[in-house]
Image: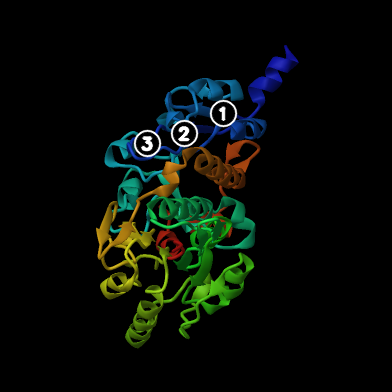
C-alpha cells in the first residue's frame, strides 16, 4: 500500500469557505481579499470565490486564483462570507447546515434572521461581536466606522465653501474652519483626527463624558454640556426627556458657531437621536455643512433626507448611506482581516468547530438560542 496515499486519504477535510459577489449595486466591498487567502490555506481551508466578487473593489479574478483560491459556486460552501445582509434570493441559495458570516442587521425590523433560522442556516452577525479586548481584531463595525469617519470629513471639505486650514497669503489671512463632531465613537474620533489633519479647528461632543480624554488625544477640544449618558458595555444609554430637552437647547446654541458639523450618534435598535434641530440649522452661517452619518436610522439632523444632499437655510446637509462602500479597496482589506480572525476562532485543524462556550461566538451567532441576547450587543 502507498503510505503517502493512505495518509492523504485519512487526512481530515478542511472547511470550504465561499466568497460571494455582492448583489446590491451600491455595495462595492468584498468579504475576503486575495492577500488574506494564503493564511487561510495554511490552516487547511479551501477558498472558493464567485467570479467577479472583487470587481467592485478593483480586484480581478486572477488575483484570487494566484493567491490559491478557486473560482466557482460559493453558495455551496460550508461557510459563506459576505458583506451586506442577504436578500431573499440569496437566502434561497443556502441550505440547512451551512454557516453564514456577515453584516446581518439583527436589530433592524426588516432583518432576515427569521428566514435564516427557517432555512436551518447557522448565522454569525459581525455587528454582534462583543466589545472586548481580544475581539478587537474581529470588530468589523469599528473597522468600517473608521472608513466612514474619514470619508465624512472629505465629503464635508468638498461641500464646504470655505478652506479647512488657516491660510496666510499676500491677500490676507484666512481663519481655519471650525468643525464639531457629535458622537465620539470610532467614526467620530476618526472624523476629528481627519479634520485636524486638514487644518480645521476641531471640537468633539458625546453624552458619555468618559470619552473626553479620547477627544483631546486627537487634538480636539471637548464640548461640555453637563449631561452624562454613560451606559453599560461602552454604549450610551437613552436620555430622559428632561435631559434631551436640556441637551437640545445647549447644542442648538453651540452648533450655530461652527462651519462644519459631522454627526455619528446612534442608539442600538432605536431611531437616531435628533441632535441638530431645524432652528440650529437656520442659525448656522450660510455655506456651512452638516454631514449626517446616522441617515440609515433617520438621521441626527431634523432636516436630513437620508441618502441625499440638500440645502436648507443656505446650509448643505449631506446624509450619505454606506460610506465604507465608497472606499472599497481599504474597506474590504480591513473587513477581510476581521472575517479571517473570526474564522480562525471557529476552526480546529482546518475544520469548522465553533466553541459556543466562547463569548465571541456565542454572542455573534444570531440563529441560536442566544440570538436575542446577541442582538443587544449591536454597536451604535
* Disc ID at residue 224: none
- Report the mark closest to the observer, 2 or 1: 2
Q: Is residue 54 left or right of residue 321?
A: right
Q: Nearer the viewer, residue 22 or 249?
A: 249
User: Which residue is under mark 3?
Assistant: 95
In the rendered image, is residue 60 in sight? yes
Q: Residue at x 46, y 68 (%)?
A: 180
Residue picked out by circle 1: 46
| Left or right: where 299 falls relative to 32 | left
Element class at badge 3: loop
Question: Label 2 vs label 1: CA separation?
Answer: 22 Å
Viewer-nearest residue: 219 or 62: 219
Q: Nearer the viewer, mark 3 or mark 2?
A: 2
Label located before the other in sequence (2 or 1): 1
Give coordinates of residue 94: x percent, y percent.
36, 36
User: Where does label 2 land, which residue?
Assistant: 57
Q: Quadrant of the N terminus?
A: top right
Q: In the orientation shown, which residue stands out farthest toward the bottom?
A: 242
Q: CA distance from mark 3 to mark 2?
A: 28 Å
The residue located at (60%, 56%) in the rendering is: 136
Q: Residue furthest front?
A: 170
Residue 175 position (above or below residue 97): below
Q: Is residue 325 above or below residue 210?
A: above
The spot of residue 272 in percent (x, y) is: 34, 66
What residue lies at 41% left-to-right and 61% top-to-bottom? Answer: 375
- The quadrant the C terminus occupies is bottom left
Badge 3: how crowded within 10 Å, few (<14), some, or many (20+)?
some
Amino acid at each position: 500500500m502507498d503510505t503517502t496515499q493512505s495518509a492523504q486519504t485519512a487526512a481530515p477535510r478542511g472547511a470550504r469557505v465561499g466568497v460571494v459577489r455582492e448583489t446590491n449595486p451600491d455595495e462595492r466591498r468584498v468579504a475576503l481579499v486575495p492577500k488574506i487567502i494564503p493564511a487561510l490555506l495554511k490552516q487547511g481551508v479551501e477558498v472558493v470565490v464567485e467570479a467577479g466578487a472583487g470587481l467592485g473593489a478593483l480586484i480581478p479574478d486572477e488575483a484570487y486564483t494566484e493567491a490559491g483560491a478557486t473560482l466557482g459556486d460559493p453558495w455551496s460552501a460550508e461557510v459563506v462570507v459576505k458583506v451586506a445582509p442577504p436578500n431573499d434570493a440569496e437566502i434561497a441559495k443556502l441550505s440547512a447546515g451551512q454557516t453564514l458570516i456577515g453584516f446581518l442587521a439583527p436589530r433592524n425590523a426588516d432583518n432576515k434572521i427569521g428566514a435564516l433560522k427557517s432555512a436551518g442556516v447557522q448565522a454569525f452577525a459581525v455587528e454582534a461581536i462583543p466589545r472586548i479586548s481580544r475581539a478587537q481584531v474581529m470588530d468589523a463595525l469599528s473597522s468600517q466606522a473608521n472608513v466612514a469617519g474619514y470619508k465624512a470629513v472629505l465629503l464635508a471639505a468638498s461641500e464646504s465653501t470655505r478652506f479647512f486650514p488657516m491660510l496666510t497669503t499676500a491677500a490676507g489671512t484666512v481663519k481655519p474652519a471650525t468643525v464639531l463632531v457629535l458622537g465620539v465613537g470610532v467614526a467620530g474620533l476618526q472624523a476629528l483626527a481627519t479634520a485636524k489633519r486638514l487644518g480645521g479647528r476641531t471640537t468633539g461632543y458625546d453624552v458619555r463624558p468618559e470619552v473626553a480624554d479620547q477627544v483631546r488625544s486627537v487634538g480636539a477640544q471637548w464640548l461640555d454640556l453637563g449631561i452624562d449618558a454613560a451606559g453599560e458595555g461602552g454604549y450610551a444609554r437613552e436620555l430622559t426627556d428632561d435631559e434631551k430637552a436640556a441637551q437640545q437647547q445647549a447644542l442648538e446654541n453651540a452648533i450655530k458657531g461652527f462651519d462644519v458639523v459631522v454627526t455619528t450618534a446612534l442608539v442600538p435598535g432605536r431611531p437616531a437621536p435628533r441632535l441638530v434641530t431645524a432652528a440650529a440649522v437656520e442659525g448656522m452661517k450660510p455655506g456651512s455643512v452638516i454631514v449626517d452619518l446616522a441617515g440609515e436610522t433617520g438621521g441626527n439632523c431634523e432636516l436630513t433626507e437620508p441618502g441625499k444632499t440638500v440645502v436648507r437655510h443656505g446650509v448643505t446637509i449631506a446624509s450619505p448611506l454606506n460610506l465604507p462602500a465608497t472606499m472599497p479597496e481599504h474597506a474590504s482589506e480591513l473587513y477581510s482581516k476581521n472575517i479571517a480572525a473570526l474564522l480562525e476562532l471557529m476552526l480546529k485543524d482546518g475544520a469548522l468547530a465553533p466553541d459556543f462556550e466562547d463569548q465571541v461566538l456565542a454572542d455573534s451567532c444570531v440563529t441560536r438560542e442566544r440570538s436575542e441576547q446577541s442582538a443587544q450587543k449591536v454597536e451604535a
